[in-house]
Image (tube, helix red, strand yellow):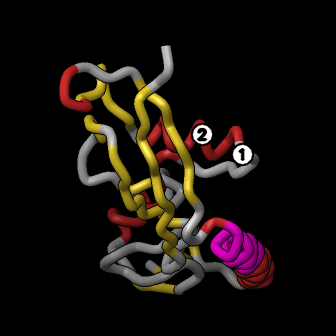
Amino acid sequence: MEVILLEDHPHLGGRGDVVNVARGYARNYLIPKKLAVLNTPSRQPTIQAEEQFHNREVSKEKESAEILKEELDGFTINIKAKTGIEGKLYGSITSKDIACVLEEKGYIIDKRSIKLEDHIKEIGNYSIEISLFQDIKININLLVEEADD
């Protein structure tokens, strides 16, 4: 049975590809999960229009990621936190904390795109990698300081 893929599939192909699969696989898995639709002549123009729209949206996202990269690459943010003995933090600094500080500065970045090897638990300077788009990554500097109580 021929189907048109609506999403990228690791074993079948990319979005918009026409593939031949077993009837049961199409009817019981791909179509109900909205991963594919049956290939009919009337669906071809609709799928092509959707693919063009998707490509335009991806291009816009990539352009905005490039602009954000120019603005933020090498950017430094400061976070003040309560500390205990020897510069150890009460609690830790997480990707959510970093995303909140960036949002306060006017940059909306999803916390899941901020790559931390582990939570930050000490005062110091850190280099943080942020993935803005598929292959666009930046590094920002994080300065964790002792809070003035």
- Between 81 and 43, the residue placed more toward the observer is 81
Name the image quarter holding the N terminus: bottom left
Kindly state the secondary structure of the residue where label 1 is placed: loop
Labels 1 & 2 near each other (Cβ < 8 A): yes
Quadrant in the rendering for residue 65: bottom right
Taking the spot 42% from the left edge, 83% from the top edge, the residue there is 13
Q: Is residue 46 visible?
A: no
Horizontal and vertical percent position of residue 34 = 54, 57
Question: From the viewer's perspective, is 136 left or right of 68?
Answer: left
5 sits to left or right of 13: right
Q: Where is residue 60 shown, x and y percent of the image?
A: 77, 74
The kind of residue tagged 2 is: Val
Residue annotated with mark 2: 101
Visible residue check, residue 93: yes
Q: Position of residue 50 (x, y in %)?
A: 75, 74
| Residue under numbered circle 1 | 105
All told, the count of numbered labels is 2
Q: Quadrant of residue 58?
A: bottom right
Q: Is residue 61 magenta?
A: yes
Q: Position of residue 82 (x, y in %)?
A: 39, 21
Q: Residues within 10 Å of mark 1 (few under 14, many from 20)?
A: few
Q: Nearer the viewer, residue 147 or 121?
A: 147
Residue 133 lies left or right of residue 10; in this view the side is: right
| As drawn, 114 above or below 16 | above
Residue at point 48%, 62% (across, down): 130
SS at mark 2 in the image:
helix
